[in-house]
Image (cartoon, coloured by chain):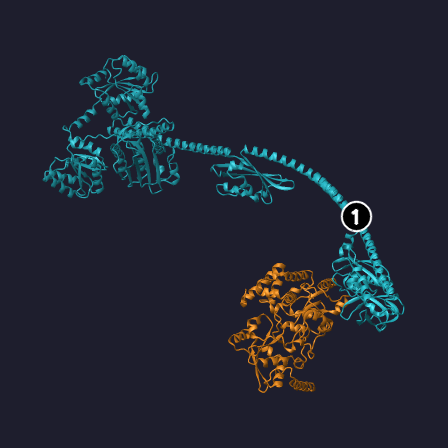
Amino acid sequence: MKKKCLSALAIITAVVMLASCSGFTRTSNNSGNVTLTLMGKTTDLNKSYMTRIFDLYQKSTGNKLDIISIEDDDYEMVAAEKFESGDTPDIFLHFHNADLNRFNIEDNFYYLNDESWVSDLTDGALAYCLDSSGNLLGLPFWESSVSGCYYNKTILDSLGLKPAATQTEFDVLCQALSDTGRTPICWPADGCSWMAQFGLDPIFADDPELLEKINKNEIAYSDIPDVRNMVEWISGAAEKGWFGSNYLNEGYSDISGILGSGNAVMTFIWDTWFYTDFDAGNKYSIDDFALMPVFLNTTEGGTYEGGNLNMMMVNKNSGNLDAALDFLSFCADDDNYNAAFDGISTVSCFKGQKSNIQSEMVTDAADSVAENERVSTAASRIIGYSAEDVLTALDSMFRGKTDVDGCVRLMDDYRIAEARMQGADGF
Amino acid sequence: MYKKKWFGKLTASALVCLVVIAAILIGIFYFNFISRKIYEDSTDHLSEVYGQVNRSFGAFVERNWGILYSWSDSAALNGADESTVPEFISREREYWGFSEFYFISADGKCVTADGTAGSMDLGKDWDILTLQGEPVMAGETLSDGQEIIVFAVPVPHAEYNGFGFDAIAISYTNADMANSLNVDSFSGKAKCFVIHNDGRVLISTQTGGNVFGNYLTYLNAAADLDESDLARIKNDWENGSAGLLQCKIGDVDYCIQYQPVGYQGYILLSAVPQNVVSAGFLSVQKITMNVLVIIFLLLGAALFTLLLLRSRKQSRKSETELQYRERIFDVLSNSVDDIFIMLDSENHNVDYISPNIERLLGIPVSEARDNIKVLEKCSPGGNVVIPKEEFAKIPLEGNKNWEYEYVHQHTGERRWYRMTVYNMVIRDIKKYIIVMSDRTLEQQMNQKMREALNAATSANEAKSNFLSNMSHDIRTPMNAIVGFSVLLEKDAENPDKVREYTRKITASSHHLLSLINDVLDMSKIESGKTSLNVDHFSLPELLEELNIILMPQAKAKQQEFKIFVNGTPPEQLVGDKLRLNQILINLLSNAVKYTPDGGKIDMTVSELSRPAQQFVKLRFVVRDNGIGMSEEFQKKIFSPFSREISSVTNKIQGTGLGMAITKNLVDLMGGIISVESAPGKGSTFTVELIFTVPEEDESDLWFSRKVKRIFVVDDEEDVCTHVKEMMSDTGVEVEYATDGTAAINAIIDAHRHGNDFDVILLDWKMPEPDGIQTARLIRDKVGHEVPILVLTSYDWSEIETEARAAGINAFMPKPFFTSTFWHTIKPLYTPDDDVKKQDAESEAGIMKGLLFLVAEDNELNAEILTEMLKMEGADCVVASNGKQAVDMFESSEPGHFDMILMDVQMPVMNGYEATGAIRASSHPEAKTIPIAAMTANTFAEDVRDALDSGMDGHLSKPIDMSAARELVSKLVKRSGPDAENKGGDNR
């Protein structure tokens, strides 16, 4: 209780201090209260750090936020209709994914490149919010995580092995682990659909031109050698037993047991999973794990996938443009975001973000993450991409129904079909 | 023999196996020896290679330390211008290839030549460096995580840009160091490490980086080494000993060799896959071994080839011989009528089949080879001709026979085959060899023999039956004749009894004669000596005669007998009337005979067709509702001596030859005869014959006789219309009525108008008024000018007197024929109506006063004839043979004999010869004297023979006096009263 009182006092103090600063008070006409409309998904808007920042803003500025909460399932359709009809909010919450394209970004949203808080964004968060032209579309204000290869360092030490820093080392490591009778990688093929997207991220994140072409249906996966390399590596790893003998029947819920028991040494997952799904009653605890890059034969140095971030985007046609920009600056203030994310387990989006809980695994690998992290590109930027479809294609290959090339073709077929369903241009 | 062969094969097989096993054992031994040798040499080589690597690495270490010591002594680092140090270091780095140069202080700090400060904790190595004054080589991780190898030497304490240091060092990255350990040997698959003696990895040549932290730990986890192995390794490493071991890591066998580097307990460890060690070492030995193996294989291959060639040659020879034999067998089998088949006993697949099966059974060889059951197609009844179960019962080396009839698939010919199946073992495989021998001829012969036997048996039985029947049938009339002859003698004084006895004797004689005639007729027909006597005859007359003959018989049994004519068949025909008559009488007599009292019998004549203008095909159908015949008997009714046995037929006399004679006569006349019958339902016989139709006389007889209109009265309108139809071609007008009253009215009406009918035809049996009453009424009304004829199917003798009294002029039998009608009315229009009567009367006394020369060798016959001629008022002179007859004729005066009756079969000179002699004699009447044959030979050919010999006529024995009178009237020209005198003279 005392802690809560102290926290509230600290917040109030911070608000007073902030209010006295001019850095975020872009609007000069603060004589009158401004009401900003903010549209988002119901679930997203109800996140604690969101409600905290909304409250903090309203209390600090006296401005009002008219929260337009739309049910999650209807969000894309309803929001699009509102933008078409001109019933647009001042601030719009959206992930940077392929669905964002339907909102006519250039005409509707304000590029935030020159905002003062940009330099405070972590590289990963900044990269996530930039469009292909380098324009900053929104303020990342969301909980985040780092996806990578989490390995059992205790087991590795006991085997006289060290984590890999390159794809080559990773292959040696997998074989060395396999030689000791361990399953190198936990690859639960029955439902864990995200695995392969870590390999696709470097292909499209490192070469935006490829992303553009594939989204215009000018090329396909089958035209990209790295895609085939990845699928071939996955196929080879499965054949060599690196996924274990029962991986086809293993699913999401099995990961905790497999990793916790030490039956597998590594898996491709995100740090917050250890706080939400990993069973502490296992033989091995979170302290036994460490982070290294994901190696899926698409980049020698491996890759991490940054989190998917909800962006606060400003309606460039808003009558309250300045107030909206001020709102973003308010949110990007280190005191405010630290107040909002206090105690939240997340990777930092801001360099000054300290109040959140960051896993030691990520912290220990900070340099490696900083060097090799990539925006979640495949899942969010490739039109028609469906992790489930990729899983289905891989499953066909794992079960011998098709070969590597057939798997790539299936991935293409499913992607193109999905894109056509979405009515994407060029498909 | 079979056991001996088997033993021989077993011994050979055992020897081959022993040789092979020995070769394998020697091979294994040699292979192991070579492998071990190669391995030993390989590991020696491995040790030697890595010994060299170790030495090189040592030199590398010494060099680095040497460099550092040289620098510590040089002015470059000691007391010189510090500003020149970076340049010096840069130059040296470029030359020696190290990564960095460090000044190291005792507190673990370090600074590079360009002044970059850092930390370098060398740990225990620092003690060695400073306390022992020894150079060190150590691994160090920089603050950025980079791992480096540091070479350091102690130096007297000095300062560099204010940084006090006690040692200097240069560093290399792991990659730089790896280059100094890499060897070209082992295809790049060797791993080499420099490790601490506790297993920690200092330097690794692992491609792409190092993931091994402690190799001893890794070996413990990954290799199949037990505790003692690990302890030995650990001990070796701690003691700085070299060693070599084999282990499996994962699925790969490794050779692990280690040796001390010589500094600070470092160990140089190499891990090389065993197959790489062997592959890369002493290739000459391997090549030698390979060459040996190849030579061995080549020798083996050569031997195998030689054996194979010999085997093939032998096999080819055997195959050739087999083909020769098969070809010869094919040719042989093609020339015989036996089919050869070899079947597998398990599945009945065809191993061989002789090609003549196509010729003999019409089955293609390929088809039979595919499935032997195709033979069943040839079985007329689709029988199983390959009885598998029966085959299986045949004992080994035994055989069994079957006989089947087969139908040739192309020609339909039926052939019999005896199938002999042999159960044999050929090369340990059970086979069935089938020989199908053609037994068709044998079967046919047997069949014929059976048929002949049956026929003979049947004939024998039939003849036995016949003789039995004949015995009975002949004895019956003979008994009557003999019996009544005795009675005749006894009652000779009683005229009534004499007449009765003679009548019965005559009847029995006629019956006996008919029996004899039948037998002789059949005998004649069967001997093929029957010929036809073709002449013009009248169909109506023939039918009238049949009616006359059969009507009394039918009437005696109260049977209804009718003859019908359908259509207008020609009345005049050319054919053998006698034989036709015989055929129809036989059929009709049988109908009467086998139809119970009160039954119905009819005969229908119809014209079927005219194959040509001058021919007509007639059908005679004799139908009765009598006892009928069984189907079985119908099949043999036309066979000789056949009589159906039943309670009814047993009471009926007969030889069983009648229908056989009938059939033969029909055949002789080129016709057909058939029968339809069923027991109790009567029988229908149908005879179809073709006759020649003579050209018709076109003269108009009817109008010349002033017959222009006739009136027919019959209650059956069909009869009326039939008459009208029959007369349609004559131009005579026909009117009719179906009852007497209407007829009378029409006739009276015609009379009143002066237009009387020229002839009136009346049915006898009509509803009131009947024919006679109607005639009487007509005479009353129209007088006696118009001829009235009665048309009837019945014997009119019983009503003739009454009918003539009623004014009926003549009688006509049904059915109506124009020719009959004409012959009937012709006398009525003759100017002298008494001529006919006179002719009849004159014929009755034609022989009166004539003298016959009778040539007869049988005295009894001569006596009978003499008496019969006397009864006719004639006389005769008897000659006992032909010669005597000739003599008597030649010696007679011209005109002495009126006629000669000549028996044919006589001693001394037969009748033909005698006739020839007479005709050839000089007697004035030699050519003209009438000579008639008098013989029991009554067939047409007998008649012809008689005429050919010069005779003028033929009389059958026994002599029928009416026939004799007719013949005499035809041949003897009476010259007036003298004749009677001459006869009287001779008497």
Is B455 situated above or below B430? above
Residue B450 seen in the current view: yes
Quadrant in which the C terminus of chain B is drawn: top left
Q: Nearer the viewer, residue B674 or B78?
A: B78
Which chain does cyan denote in the image?
B
What kind of residue is marked 1?
Answer: Val
Q: Nearer the viewer, residue B427 or B911?
A: B427
Is B625 situated above or below B159? above
Residue B243 seen in the current view: no
Residue B855 coordinates in the image, percent (x, y) = 30, 18
Residue B875 coordinates in the image, percent (x, y) = 24, 19
Which chain does orange denote in the image?
A
Look at mark 1 in the image and give the residue it sits on. Answer: B284
Left or right? Give the position of B536 relative to A57: left
Q: Residue at x 39, y 37 (%)?
A: B635
Quadrant for residue A10, please give it. Answer: bottom right
Residue A398 coordinates in the image, percent (x, y) = 64, 61
Q: Residue at x 11, y 41 (%)?
A: B749
